[in-house]
Amino acid sequence: MAGRVFALHAKPPPPPGEHGLRKPEASEVEVTARGVSGDFNRYRTEKLAGDPDSALLLIPLETIEALNRDGWPVAHGDLGENVTTEGIPYDGMAPETTWRIGSVVARTTRACAPCNYLYDLPYVGAERGPEFLKTMVGRRGWYARVVAPGRIRVGDPIVPV
């Protein structure tokens, strides 16, 4: 099963005391064994001590579209993903699947669990947070380890290897 890169996202570390998931869009990114160059992932950095199994976060566009149909106005980049994929269903990204994404080779390692940082999204908040976290179970995306670094561009193919 093959797909393509719909969108790419990276966000530098926020100033002290600030946080937020929304990652700005990029047309191209450089990927190292640590993830997207210049990108900050709070959970990976603060809780997982830079765990290389969490170097990239991949989310299918189809999952975002399903959330929209469920009444959540999620846009790509809102969930902190680095790569918004298109054409590969959520279940198609099972752990230990190896992908070529542009010139990068990455292996999905595990599903990303919903976290309380999602409350910070403007359409969620504290009141709707528990409902959104419940909605996100099994939809939060997939972490991946970088097997071979390289570059990824919007539109690049994503193919299993």
Image (spheres, rainbow, N blue to C red):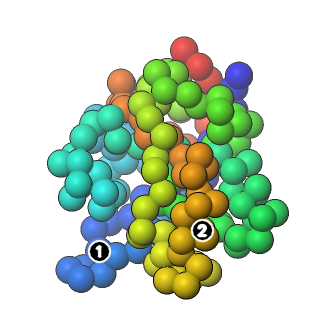
- Label for residue 132? 2
Determine if residue 70 is in view: yes
Percent of width and height locating residue 145 = 36, 32
Mark 1 packing: few (<14 Cα in 10 Å), some, or many (20+)? few
Nearer to the camera, 27 or 66: 66
Query: What amino acid is labelled 2 in the image?
Result: Phe
Seen at 69% across and 26% down, the residue is 2
Residue 101 in the image: above or below residue 116: above
Mark 2 packing: few (<14 Cα in 10 Å), some, or many (20+)? many
Q: Quadrant of residue 116?
A: bottom left
Query: Is 6 displayed left or right of 50 in the figure?
Result: right
Name the secondary structure under disc 2. helix
Determine if residue 24 is in view: no
Nearer to the camera, 63 or 102: 63
Seen at 59% across and 19% down, the residue is 160
Query: Is 85 displayed left or right of 77 in the figure?
Result: right
Percent of width and height locating residue 49 = 18, 48
Percent of width and height locating residue 146 = 36, 31
Quadrant that contains the C terminus:
top right
Tag 2–tag 1 contact (CB < 8 Å): no
Outermost residue on the right side: it is: 69
Q: On the image, numbered disc 1 is attached to which residue?
A: 14
- The answer for how far apart the CA atoms under marks 2 and 1 are is 24 Å
Query: What amino acid is labelled 1 in the image?
Result: Pro
Quadrant that contains the N terminus:
top right
Q: Earlier in the sequence, mark 2 or mark 1?
A: 1
Seen at 62% across and 23% down, the residue is 159
Percent of width and height locating residue 68 = 76, 65
